């Protein structure tokens, strides 16, 4: 059985100045996120969370405003 691949999603940059080599330190559209996904995932596995899905970032901002 073939596994369904997740569609790439836009990513919000939350790195506060930190960056990954060859990856733009800004919000990424879905195509750019797919292009740099392996590097971003490797950094995340090493504790460096520089990008989050746009939906997740929006939910966090909404929660912070209501507190």
Image (cartoon, helix red, strand yellow):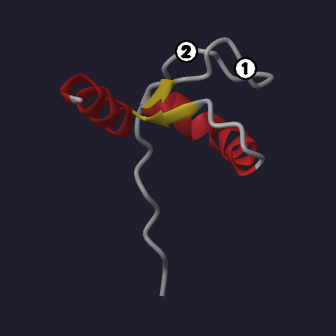
57 or 7, which lies in front? 57
Is 35 situated left or right of 30 in this image?
A: right
Where residue 18 sits in the image (x, y, percent)? 71, 18
Element under label 1?
loop
Q: Are marks 1 and 2 in contact (CB under 8 Å)?
A: no
Farthest residue, direction top: 17
Answer few, some or many: residues within 10 Å of disc 1's Cα (few below 14, many 20 plus, some between 14 and 19): some
Element under label 2?
loop
Farthest residue, direction bottom: 1
Is 62 situated left or right of 24 in this image?
A: left
Is 65 situated left or right of 17 in this image?
A: left
Q: Which numbered circle lies on residue 19?
A: 1
Residue at position x 68%, y 44% in the image: 44
Instruction: Please report whichever mark, 1 or 2, sits nearer to the chain's N-terminal start.
Output: 1
Is 14 situated left or right of 66 in this image?
A: right
Farthest residue, direction front: 67
Q: Which numbered circle lies on residue 56?
A: none
Residue at position x 74%, y 47% in the image: 42
Answer few, some or many: residues within 10 Å of disc 2's Cα (few below 14, many 20 plus, some between 14 and 19): some
Q: Which numbered circle lies on residue 26?
A: 2
Where residue 6 sits in the image (x, y, percent)? 43, 57
Where residue 13 sits in the image (x, y, percent)? 53, 22
Location of residue 49 (image quadrant): top right
CA–CA distance in space, label 1 to label 2: 9 Å
In the image, residue 3 above or below residue 11: below
Where residue 40 sits in the image (x, y, percent)? 67, 39
């Amino acid at each position: 059985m073939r596994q369904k691949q997740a569609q790439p999603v836009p990513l919000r940059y939350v790195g506060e100045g930190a960056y990954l080599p060859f990856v733009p330190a800004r919000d990424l559209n879905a195509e750019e996120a797919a292009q740099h996904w392996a590097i971003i995932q490797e950094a995340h596995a090493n504790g460096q969370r520089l990008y989050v899905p746009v939906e997740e970032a929006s939910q966090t901002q909404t929660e912070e405003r209501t507190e």
